[in-house]
Amino acid sequence: MADPAKKVAQQTEDRLETLADTVREKFDKVTEGSFRDRIIEGRFADQVDHGVDQARAETQRKQD
């Protein structure tokens, strides 16, 4: 009786491992190329935030 239970447990474990691998692959595919990844890669590093520059200029003018 113990052998069939071990067999079922092993099959269940194998299925869960396969499922976990599939979920990891799909998650990686979904998150590939996300906005966060583009920021980390520095794709926006060369772009200047003009809004901040304009606010600083306005503040400077008000102080003068």
Image (spheres, rainbow, N blue to C red):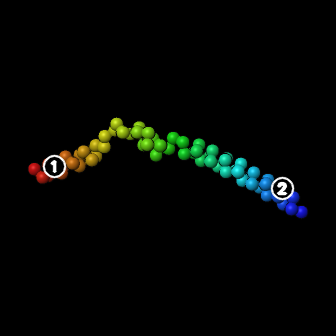
* Left or right of residue 18, residue 56 in this image: left
CA separation in Å, label 1 and label 2:
76 Å
- Point out the residue furthest to the right here: 1
Q: Residues within 10 Å of mark 2 (few under 14, many from 20)?
A: few
Q: Which mark is residue 32?
A: none
Instruction: Provide the secondary structure element on which disc 1 rests.
Output: helix
- Point out the residue furthest to the front here: 2
- Point out the residue furthest to the left here: 64
Q: Viewer-proximal residue, 21 or 10?
A: 10
Q: Residue at x 67, y 47 (%)?
A: 22
Task: Please name the amino acid that badge 2 sits on.
Answer: Lys
Q: Residue at x 51, y 41 (%)?
A: 33
Which residue matches tag 1? 60
* Occupied quadrant, residue 3: bottom right
Q: Residues within 10 Å of mark 1 (few under 14, many from 20)?
A: few
* Occupied quadrant, residue 12: bottom right
Q: Viewer-proximal residue, 17 or 62?
A: 17
Residue 38 % position (x, y): 45, 41
Which residue matches tag 2? 7
Task: Please name the amino acid that badge 1 sits on.
Answer: Gln
* Left or right of residue 58, residue 20 in this image: right
Q: Which numbered mark, 1 or 2, is in the foreground of this view?
A: 2
Residue 48 % position (x, y): 31, 40
Circles 1, 2 touching at the beta carbon (< 8 Å): no
Instruction: Provide the secondary structure element on which disc 2 rests.
Output: helix
Say which quadrant the N terminus sits in: bottom right
Q: Residue at x 36, y 39 (%)?
A: 45
Along the polypeptide, which appears first: circle 1 or circle 2? 2
* Left or right of residue 34, residue 59 in this image: left
Q: How many marks?
A: 2
Q: Residue at x 86, y 62 (%)?
A: 2
